[in-house]
Image (spheres, coloured by chain):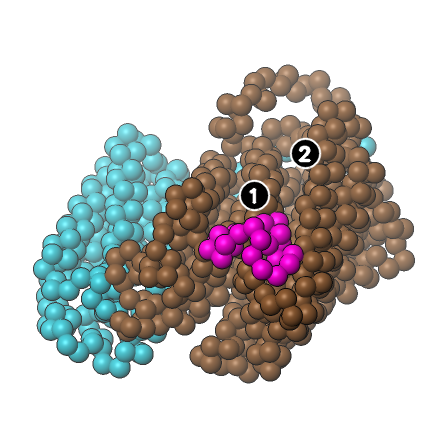
Chain colours: A brown, B cyan
Amino acid sequence: MATTALRPAARSGTGIYEWLTTTDHKKIGILYMISSFVFLAIGGLLALGVRAELAQPGLQFLDESTYNQLFTMHATIMIFWVIIPFLGAIGNYVVPLQLGAPDMAFPRINALSFWLIPFAGIIVLSGFVLGGAADAGWTAYPPVSSIKYSPGPGMNLWIMGLILIGTSSILGAVNFLVTIFRMRAPGMTLFRMPILTWTVLVTAVLVLMATPVLTSALIMLFIDRNFGGSFFDPATGGSAILWQNIFWFYSHPAVYIMVLPAMGVISEILPVFSRKPLFGYKAFVFATAGIGALGFSVWAHHMFTTGGVFLPFFSIMTFFIAIPTGVKMFNWVATMWRGQLIFSTPMLFAIGFLSMFLIGGINGVFSAPVPVDYAIHATYWIVAHIHYVLFGGSFLGIMAGLYFYFPKMTGKMLDERLGKIHFVLMYVGLNLTFMPMHLLGLSGMPRRIADYSPTAGWNDLNLIATIGGFTIGASLLPLLWNIYISLRNGKAAGDDPWEANTLEWATSSPPPAWNFDRLPAITSERPLFDARHGRSGKDHA
Amino acid sequence: MSALTPAAHETSHAAGRGKKGLGNPVLGMLLFIVSEIMFFAGLFAAYFNLRTSTGTWPPAGNGAFELHGEILFPAVMTSLLVLSSVTCQFAVWRIRAGDRKGMNRALLATVILGVIFLCGQAYDYTQLGFGIADGVFGSTFYVLTGFHGAHVLGGVLMLSVCLYRGGLGQFSAEHHDMVEATSIYWHFVDVVWILLFTLIYIV
């Protein structure tokens, strides 16, 4: 590393002021991650409150009103302040590096996107101390969310917080798209971009086209609640179903916003730890774009039982969207097939993602036929499905990305033994929690209830789910301890500890503020592999 | 890293310099407008949904809803806004030709026309015989025109910043991405208003 000596010594690079005012995409990525961990703790405690109450029939710890606030805020925080920003953290840190770019296209807008998140979070959570947080469920269906049935300030604060975090997402999406279209290094053609960057691109398009629609719905709800509007109030000519249509037009694509970048992370990890190229690179790109496009045509499968939507169309589109997802699953398994598998912690979480997301896909497409949907609508089956997708899928993908990119972000390796303890606890815990919910749903237990009959036969399954929930909570302790001790005295990572394929591993760990002193020639989607094996061909400079 | 050096080249090229096509701010504005289109699409979707399910439109029972007869004032305002799009584009053409003075004059005219439109809208609001709480007609009218007005205000602020920077001589024939981006936004706001005007006062 002859170039190291040429770098100016790090000055004032670590002070608090530097972090508060930074426009460096890597520091902003780490800020995103820290914020996501804080909100993960909050959202996790809310979930444990819900599980503690449901462990046995009767009301032990909470009254119904508090229970409603807990499950509403759990979903809101986990979706908007944990999963999406966690993926934003990985995207922010990694995408410019993967493109060979020095930063995002609009660094100051990038900082604004981040800082909106904690402030919006404080607004939403402040409901708890200002007379009750939002309690209409994260879907906020009118009339439950109307001023009549949610009179407190919590619902208004919820609307304001969501509009702000939506704005943060939209600005981030514009930033990612301009970065990807305009900031690629020479030789980095679109079809040489790493899959993670491709998934971020499609996700940004989804955010750009779906999130503003949610903003419009939230504004109309706000007008209804505070200025006597009648958008969603049938008594004055409005339509409650209108809210559901507009809300789900955003919130179904939002599921793909939450899972596509996690798929991208997995697609970076599996080839590296299988010592093979990704199987079917182009098929993967087109499957991602296909999921993005089809994602806008399935929203009403959340509304079958309203009787207000065209059932056959939305049912069959829901089946269709399983096809590109199946293509991806095939590609991942084929990537591992006959590879030299290395079971490091990132790989364990990636395989965990594959197995759990497979269940989340199957129990989702199982819900697509209209008669089945009528039977399981708003039961714990749906709760099981969404958690296998968002926890078993997105969150395990995020954890895989955390273990994979931690060495690049900090220059230190995470401890493998603690990582494996974390993985086993989390994997067992999540199955203990969410597998019984399938049975609860099939036997008719509705979601969003604080109490249930002791003779309904749901006692044991609920107790198991609660034990699983606390196991998940406990599984985060080895992770936090791991991060702490690894930052203090972890093994030095070096530039490329995993012998990976993509450009982010071509620079030092952590990278300098300007990212790259030199770039290898880019003649394929695996420039580092090419450089290691002398396959770069002609230098395009 | 040293293994990579033989096939490496300077990263200065990686900054996106020397590329042809849209500048980053212009592309960013175009993408942002995609999100704005979707925002208004949500509001318009609600409008169409409520309008078709109401039966007669405007809803019977309130004479103040009959806006078709009061088209003159909004039509004048509409033509002023369309004119402001022309002056805005004129500003872009002037700075492309390197004419800073011409750009500043055209921008000033655009800002003035935008402010007149906003004042006209505020005056119009005081003259209407219904409020936002008067059923779906009132709610959709004020939310659609109100959020359009908010966008006009945003556009006027952006144009004012352009004008201020133009007065400082910060734009040239080569470097005026902000003027280009602002004019695209202003045209978009104009198009939204033409749609709104047609829906509310004519159809």
Residue A174 in view here: no
- In percent of width and height, residue A440 lies at 66, 68
- In percent of width and height, residue A195 lies at 68, 53
Q: Which mark's residue is nearer the viewer, 2 or 1? A: 1
- In percent of width and height, residue A497 lies at 80, 36
SS assignment for the magenta stretch, majority: helix
Marks 2 and 1, how far apart at CA:
25 Å
Which part of the image, by quadrant, shows the N terminus of chain A? Answer: top right
The numbered mark 1 sits on a residue in which chain? A
**Is the residue marked by circle 2 packed among few (<14), some (14-19), or many (20+) residues within 10 Å?**
many
Which quarter of the figure has residue A295? bottom right
**Is the residue marked by circle 1 packed among few (<14), some (14-19), or many (20+) residues within 10 Å?**
some
The numbered mark 2 sits on a residue in which chain? A
Q: Residue at x 30, y 39 (%)?
A: B162
Q: Residue at x 42, y 46 (%)?
A: A127
User: Is A470 left, or right, of B54 in this rendering?
Assistant: right
Which three-letter amino acid code belongs to the residue tagged 2?
A: Met
- Residue behind mark 2: A409
Q: Is residue A286 above or below residue A78?
A: below
Region of the chain picked out in magenta, as a range: A48-70
User: Is A160 left, or right, of A256 in this rendering?
Assistant: left
Q: Secondary structure at mark 2?
A: helix
- Count all numbered tags in the image, as a single digit: 2
Of residues A131 and B50, the one drawn nearer to the viewer in this rendering: A131
Residue A417 in view here: yes
Magenta-span inclusion, residue A294 = no
Magenta-span inclusion, residue A50 = yes
Q: Residue at x 81, y 58 (%)?
A: A335
- In percent of width and height, residue A158 lies at 42, 51
**The disc label shown at residue A42, or none:** 1
